[in-house]
Amino acid sequence: MVSRLLGDLLHEAVGISEKRQRDRKVSMLREKLSSPPEPTSTKHDLHEFISGYIPPIKKATKKRPFLDQNSAPQDLRALNSGAKRRRSYSVTEKAEVLQLLQNAESDASVHNKHAKVEADTGVSQSLISKWGRDRNTIFRSAAEVKTANLLRCGTKTPGANRWWPLAEEQLYKEIVQRRSRNRRVAKRWIVVRMRALIRELHPGCDKPAFRASEGWKIRFCKRYNLVPRRKSNLKAKPILERLPALQHFHTVFRKMLSYSSSGMLLPIPAVSHNQSVSADTEHDRGVLHEDDLRDPKWGRFAPHQRFNVDQVPLPFVFHAGGADTYDTKGVARVQVAENGGGSMSKRQATAQLCFRPVKAIKKKDGSLLKLIQPKPAIIFRGQGKRVSTVEKLAWNPGVDVLWQHNAWVDRAIAPAWAGDCFAKFVDEADQQLKDASLGDLVGGNLMIQDNLDAQKEETYKNVLKQKARTTSWYGPKDRTDLWQADDQGYGREHKRQCNRLQEDWLEDDDNLSRWEDNKLSVGDKRVLLTHWLTDSNSKVNQDCDLYRYHEKGGCMMTVNGWGDERITPEGTSGYSFDTVQATVGGWKSEDYTEVQKEVGDPPPNEAEPGVLSEQEDEGDLYDDEGAEADEATEAAWYIPDGFLVVESFVEEKNRVGQQILFHWQGSGWCQCVVKTLLTPAQQRKTGANFEVKYEDGDRANNLLVADTYAYGESAPYGSWVHLKKMTRVADTVAAEVVGRGRAAYALGADRQRST
């Protein structure tokens, strides 16, 4: 009771303008209360006891400035009685706070959720509760801001002034000369040669130092019409040795189309002379008349019921690749004589691309029904458990996101895609036909695919059959470049469009800075990939000839031979196969398995061809192949500014952080920094002991031992030397001496090793 009365009196004293007087009266009151009255005293007696010491206090009225309507407008903020400094939060900051609250709510060990978030962020609990009521709106707004910032593209500025025109002209001439000898032109070689040419052709240049940024590489290639090219596969067998299995596949495929699911032979119409296919028909645009889809010449599956699915690896840097080189656009054959080092590009995700040949159906009334296509799926690396809500909302809804430890399509991902993604599309596609009064075109589907282990597993085939009413069919192994629709250009166009979108994105200066400074998080890269893949898929489905992709490899085959002249696998001329009429014997649903096994294996009299891999073997570190390279195009021996050469080898177990020069065949002397000491297992596997990082950002595993320690113009390939920074005047004098006579510092023949 005493504390409550004390609180009432303190509340009345709030209006006193002089704080000192209030504090003095309160302290005197506390001394008076140190000897309170007897417990039997009434509330009235206690109130008289306190008020007898402190006289009644009148409330102080706050004077407000007089506002005259005829006077000039005043700043009304002077009337505010709140805090002098207010803290405003952006929608992104609000989303981060709410994400912490959402994580705390899912943690059973945290009792007071709001208090924990307040302790972590400094935001009051009342404000957190207020934001929580609009949680969904804040998350959506933050996702829109994130998407807008990531996808912002700048305007192109062609014709910008070049700082080193003479060096670029000479560099292009050397690239053409080098490619004429089938030598590889790598990014590292371009950077090293550009630095050397700037020192040679632009001495005393007042421009900033050459940084070899990613933006300069992109613009240099655009100026001289250079594109990255994949090394032509020279290990594949001649086309004539690969045709028997393909012809066998087409023969059995026609037989399957000739029978219904119940084993009944379907009617096979005759081919009239005026039914030949020409290149200017609507089939090349994927627009078919509804009566054409009902034509019995298609057999069991009409064109709009045939699908092809395949996987395409997605690196985040689409123009990188160790087996790639820069060459003039339009060159038919690209050969690369690699000496060492491999691809530095790594797969960030895998795209699951599925499409059908028909874009639209022309109805009898003349209207056009644009058919929907399956959404692309993207498989990211990881499990997806710690992905924020903002990132999920920032993903493009036009792509299905799946997770796998290595970003592969394995036995768990394949049935998940079939049951959750493709089955949902089949229901939507069937409903679209029913809404357009074309319900008679709804039926079973056919999925034509390669012999990936996950796609031949029984669980995957059963999910396709039961949930998506789709039959699985497989082409011959190791020949997907001849028959699979995706390999006829569909997957390549997706990568090309993603590369174009990435280049447009890099035109923005802020994006280029984030790229070069490595400020893009893994989540940002995932968001960008979902948008780039969705936009490229829409572009390819709209502009490319989807019907021709299926037709070229034979996936648009008819039962009566109509259109066989349009089956032209890559590298063939006048292709034909055994057109066995499927009029003898029946066909049962269980026969599919036997025929698929028969199709998957080549004929017994055909030797098994080599497997076509996406990337060639890296080869040895010091390969002698192509030793006839012109040494004039390699970076000559030099000492970087501000460094001195350590003449003698010094034994050190850990060289992390040291600056070294390494002599590469094909590139010359390159400066790098030691980043990591490899583990014993890695050393046995790679034959190197340290991982180094070069000036252009590339990383490689190098062998840094005493036997290869050498420097100078006569040092062999694979040599290396330790550099130390100049710190004293004596070092500067020594550097001048080295500059006048570098050959005098070269090691003797006893320290050199043969190539």
Image (cartoon, helix red, strand yellow):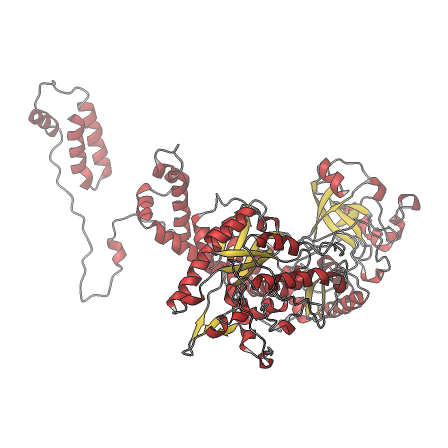
- Quadrant position of residue 703: top right
Inspect this view and state whether residue 208 appears. Answer: no
Inspect this view and state whether residue 481 appears. Answer: yes
- Quadrant position of residue 321: bottom right
Report the number of discs: 0
Query: For this rendering, which residue is in front, 694 or 405?
Result: 405
Q: Position of residue 4 (x, y in %)?
A: 17, 30
Which residue is pictured at 55% across the width and 47% down the height? 458
Q: Position of residue 616 (x, y in %)?
A: 73, 54
Query: For this rendering, which residue is in front, 33 or 229?
Result: 229
- Quadrant position of residue 682: top right
Q: Position of residue 182 (x, y in %)?
A: 80, 63
User: In the image, 545: left or right of 109?
Assistant: right
Q: Position of residue 552 (x, y in %)?
A: 63, 69
User: In the image, 645: left or right of 422?
Assistant: right
User: In the image, 481: left or right of 537?
Assistant: right
The extreme bottom residue here reads 274
Query: For this rendering, which residue is in front, 465 or 313?
Result: 465
The extreme front residue here reads 584
User: In the image, 499: left or right of 444?
Assistant: right
The extreme right residue here reads 749
Location of the N terminus by quadrant is: top left
- Tell me: residue 535, above or below residue 289: above
